[in-house]
Amino acid sequence: MGRREMHGGRRMEKEGNITVFLALVLTLVLSFLFSLLEAARVQGLRPLSERDLQLRLGSALGAYNVPLWQDYRLLFLDGGEESGTFSLAWLEGAAMEEAALEKAGEGFFRMALRNFEITEYGLAADHDGAAFRAQACRAIKEQLASGAAKALREKLSEGKSLADGEAAMKSQWDAAQDATKKAEEAAKEEAAKAKEDGEPAQPEGGKEGKDPKELPPNPMEEVDLLKRSSILYTVVEDPSGISGKSIPLQEKMASRKREAGTMEEPEGSALGKWWFLQYLDYYFSCHTGAGQGGSAGHALDYELEYCIGGKASDRENLEKTVKELLLLREAGNFATIMQDTGKQAVALEIAAAAVGFTGIAPLVQAVKIGILMAWSYIESIQDVRILLKGGSVPLIKKPSEWKSDISVGTRALEKKAEKEEAERGFSYREYLLILLLLKSEKTLAYRAMDVIEQNIRLLPGKEKFRMDFQAYKIRAAGLYTAQPMFLSFVSAGHKVDGAYGFAAEREASYL
């Protein structure tokens, strides 16, 4: 190579050249530099593929089920298809369509998504509805002030303590009935013996105390008939106002074959039954009205009662709820009457008149308890009537707050109940929460999902909606490729059609 210059009017030429050695050195230096660039690019491809996959999963979670969020503050991906089957293939297809629209050939990395596959997923009904309960608890924590939640929790704890004594009361009631039967058998034997001896039969009752005609009637037999009968129309003073709605029982979450996910139980799902009960109270309707949230349309009007009864119709669920509520109120009223010495003395006189002739003191005592429990049950019917009208009733009354007249037995029920607001009273909804507290979390979760499922199905295009098709967590695997840019002999990962291949795996969740 030469260079021409002018010197003294004469053109002079200088020779220039590059040696083979220098050319080789430059080639090696440039190769080294380009190798460094390619290596740096390759090192960035793997974390970039993982980040891209995480972003795509986050974007996928944005396609949550809108009615579930608007009505119940629950975030789930709907995996249900028009055919009524479950599939997340639409999510895979959407990711690949989005990747196809991107300009993968631009930029420094020039990476493209070649394959996207959902490998694992968790569904709302998995692990007895653990993810559903966790989201419900989180939603209600955002709605309620901690002070109000604590106050309600304390009230429910008192109610549960009272409900725990129902089994003992049933044993006492059975003992009272057995005592009455034994007294009747003893009276028959005594009458038969007197007839054989030719003596007049001894009238029932002791020789001391009041004449049985002067005492209030023994209510045990009539109350026993009430307990065995369909009590709903005795308690509800206007049966025409009872809802006639029903749902198909074959669709119940607990009994049908459910779609199952492939992921482990989410952490933090055991957030406490108290919060879940308050979620149900906030979003579900009952006999006295709708909750503060929830759907505008209701497949069942008595949703909290369904969570208690699990029956097909509102009428059946209300009847089961009323029966359980009567037993709870009976326990409370029995605690009250055991503080009233006057009523206890009258009950003892009636018991003595009924079985005192046997001379067996335990029988008399058992019948006395049975009479007190019968009066408590009659009072309970009046209490439930007040609750159904929107009033409130204390968990355990003062003796002065007793309403029914014990002197007339079950005829006290002929008096209409008035709506009352007691200072220490519990509302109908609060009593329902006590009954719900006695149910298992699994039962409550499945029945609550039944309610939500049936309500969502009332919406246009959601007729085949299923809660067990709702995904709360997904794990995906993606395959990314990138063409060599600087030097093709730099290797990284595995080759896919001559390009670098990177496999990434990430998960995303609403919890």
Image (cartoon, rainbow, N blue to C red):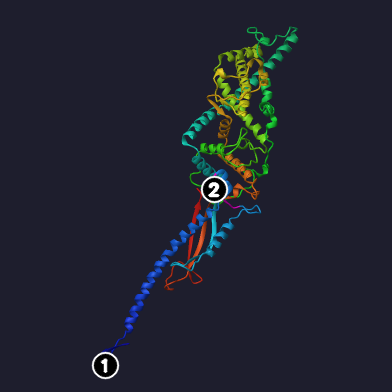
Q: Secondary structure at mark 1?
A: strand
Q: Is residue 150 rendered to the left or right of residue 330?
A: left
Tag 2, which secondary structure?
loop
Identify residue type, mark 2: Leu
Residue 398 rendering spot, x and y as whole percentages: 54, 19
- The vertical placement of 328 against 309, above or below, is above
Instruction: Give the image location of residue 510, x and y in percent.
Output: 51, 49
Q: Is residue 139 above or below residue 326?
A: below
Q: CA distance from mark 2 to mark 1?
A: 89 Å
Residue displayed at 63% across by 14% down: 351
The outermost residue toward the front is 9
Above or below residue 340? Residue 168 is: below
> From the viewer's perspective, is the residue at label 2 or at label 1 nearer?
1
78 part of magenta stretch? yes
Q: Main secondary structure of the magenta part?
A: loop
Is residue 218 in sight in this rendering? no
Quadrant for residue 408, please give it.
Answer: top right
- Residue 444 disc label: none
Q: Residue at x 65, y 21 (%)?
A: 177
* Residue marked by disc 1: 10
Q: Which residues are magenta?
A: 73-79
Q: Is residue 39 left or right of residue 368?
A: left
Question: x and y percent of residue 447 in the render?
Answer: 60, 40
Residue for badge 2: 75
